[in-house]
Image: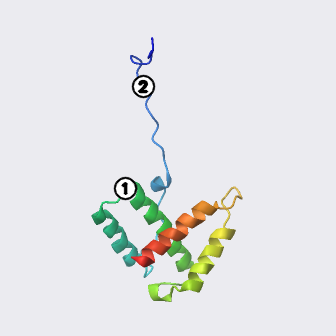
Amino acid sequence: MANSNINRPSKPRKKRQGRASQLKIAIEHNGLSPYLQHYLEWHKVKGFSVATFNRKDSMLRQFIQWCDERDIHDPRAITKPIIERYQRYLFYYRRDNGNALAYSSQNIMLSSVKAWFKW
């Protein structure tokens, strides 16, 4: 009886609902949106995973929403001081439960923006 679980039916796994299942942030009116669409299309062409695609989309939509709130609609207007302001925003941001974002989350969000501008 080394493996008594062989004949047992497996329990159905619950589908994990992550951020991808949440509503997308509406940013289509912002001038940065077409650049995001081209960047995400490039990710598809390069064969990145769906999870990577969704994560990049979510992170960059959050950044574009932040830019939109500050009336930034042109990628040429985004300078190093603007990115530093976004970094400070992430540092001071609090979730609904009052907790700060983990440094790793802040880093991932900034890395997504950096990769987008590098592209």
What amino acid is found at the position of numbered circle 1 in the picture?
Val
Q: Report, in whole angstroms, how far the alpha carbon at label 2 lies from the one at label 1.
A: 27 Å
Residues 86 and 118: in front is 118
Horizontal and vertical percent for residue 83?
56, 79
Helix, strand or loop status at disc 2: loop
Q: Earlier in the sequence, mark 2 or mark 1?
A: 2
Query: How far across and down, in percent of the image, does residue 108 sit?
Result: 53, 64
Residue occupying the point 44% across, 18% down: 5
To which residue does mark 2 refer?
10
Which residue sits at x=57%, y=66%? 107
Q: Residue furthest left?
A: 45
Q: Quadrant of the C terminus?
A: bottom left
Q: Nearer the viewer, residue 21 or 116?
A: 116
Q: Is residue 78 left or right of residue 45?
A: right
Tell me where residue 16 appears, x and y as whole percent.
48, 44
Residue ranking furthest to the front: 2
The answer to whether residue 62 shows anywhere in this view is no
Q: Which residue is mark 1?
A: 50
2 and 1 marks in contact (CB < 8 Å):
no
User: Is disc 1 placed on a helix, strand or loop?
Assistant: helix
Does 111 appear above or below 7? below
Question: What amino acid type is highlighted by mark number 2?
Answer: Ser
Picture coordinates of residue 57, whole percent (x, y): 43, 65
Q: Residues within 10 Å of mark 2 (few under 14, many from 20)?
A: few
Query: Where the N terminus falls, by quadrant?
Result: top left
Dot 1 crowding, Cα within 10 Å, few <14, some 14–19, many 20+: few
Compare residues 69 and 37 and report the one nearer the observer.
37
Give the quarter of the image for residue 109: bottom right
Q: Is residue 99 visible?
A: yes
Which numbered dot is residue 87? none
